[in-house]
Image: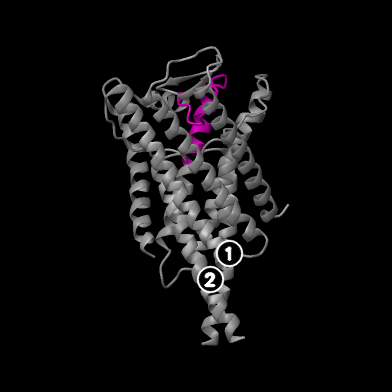
Amino acid sequence: METNQLLKITINIFFYVILFSVLGLSLFTSYAMISHDGVGILIDKDSNVVLNSAYEADLTFRDYMHVLIAILEAMFFTLSIYFLRKATLEMVDGRIFTKLVANSLRNTGFMMIIYKLCGIIKEQYKNIVYDSQFTMSFDFNGFESFIFIFVLGLFFILLSSVINNGIRMKSENDLTI
Amino acid sequence: MKSITLLKGIINFFFLGFIIASLIIVYLTVFIPGGSLDSLWSFLASSNIMGGRPLDYLSPNILLVINMTRVALFFFILFHFRFSVLKFRVDNIYGADVRRHLDYMGYGCIIFAAIQICLRTIVPILYNKGYNIFPLNFTAFNSAYFIIALGLLFIYFSKVLEQAAILKSENDLTI
């Protein structure tokens, strides 16, 4: 199988699984927060938000805020994969030097950075509100590290400017011919 | 091109931070009172750096090899990522060096993810630990699927840069 086809399949599987997981979890979390039918949410400070079928916790404003930030984080993650998929599918179809690819790559980069910023806000919110402490740390290990995602986001923004350069050169080339 | 300066600064910080953090771990486990080389090995063998369900049914030696391979591969990816960014210059944006580093990064990511997939699917079956229908974490950027897609994207981008280089040379020739 060609790289292009494999890339197309992988990104599609990843996107749809993420989309349905995030949509399902967000809807279920919202339902559990609003209704009082025995399905509760347990705000666990170590493992973040836990949906719990046997526990109806009394949620306070700070808990709602925590859930909201978690949903926002998941939303930005989904958006980053959405834009990445959009750019990938366009490129795989042979339309590489287009505005759509450049814009989608730039948006992917921005969404990745915002996703990670939401993650930091969530982490600090949890520390400040639940533990009354502020901690600052740098994680250097793995693909989920803040700095790595930040670098990856900037790299996608850089690639979008490369594509924009390509668009300009292509139009100059076409004009010359 | 403003973002490239920021990107270069941050990737240098991350690369150096990764090396310094690794050295600190070695120092804390080996050179503090009571520490030894064995404690470093046992730390690396016991660390669940694969994420997800612990693989504690594997022997410590196998875990040690897996963890070391994973760290080495991440270092390899980071090394080439850093070089591909540093070689991105305004006058040499479509250079062969950048493309080569992008290719290496792509293959590194694919091997990294393949190890993760093998450990989460094949190894549990071999050790009679059952089979999980969702063995892989989908919810974040350290998901094996994302890492494979990223690897393939890097390889694809190297081809895109190659096309752009051809366009640029045609443009230059015309002028």
> In this picture, is A173 found above or below B109?
below
Q: Which residue is mark 2?
A: A166
Magenta stretch: give its range.
B46-73
- Indicate which label's residue lies in the foreground, 2 or 1: 2
Q: Classify residue B74 as left or right of residue A137.
A: right
Identity of the amino acid at label 2? Gly
Rendering quarter of residue B120: top right
Q: Tell me where residue A45 appears, x and y as whole percent.
A: 40, 22
Is B70 a magenta residue? yes
Q: Nearer the viewer, residue A138 or A75?
A: A75
Q: Are marks 2 and 1 in contact (CB under 8 Å)?
A: yes
Instruction: Answer whether residue B141 is visible to the viewer in this image.
Output: no
Is B4 a magenta residue? no
Tag shown at residue B160: 1
Q: Tell me where residue B81 appears, x and y as whole percent.
A: 46, 53
Disc 2 element: helix
The residue shown at (58%, 86%) is A176
Q: Nearer the viewer, residue B78 or B53?
A: B53
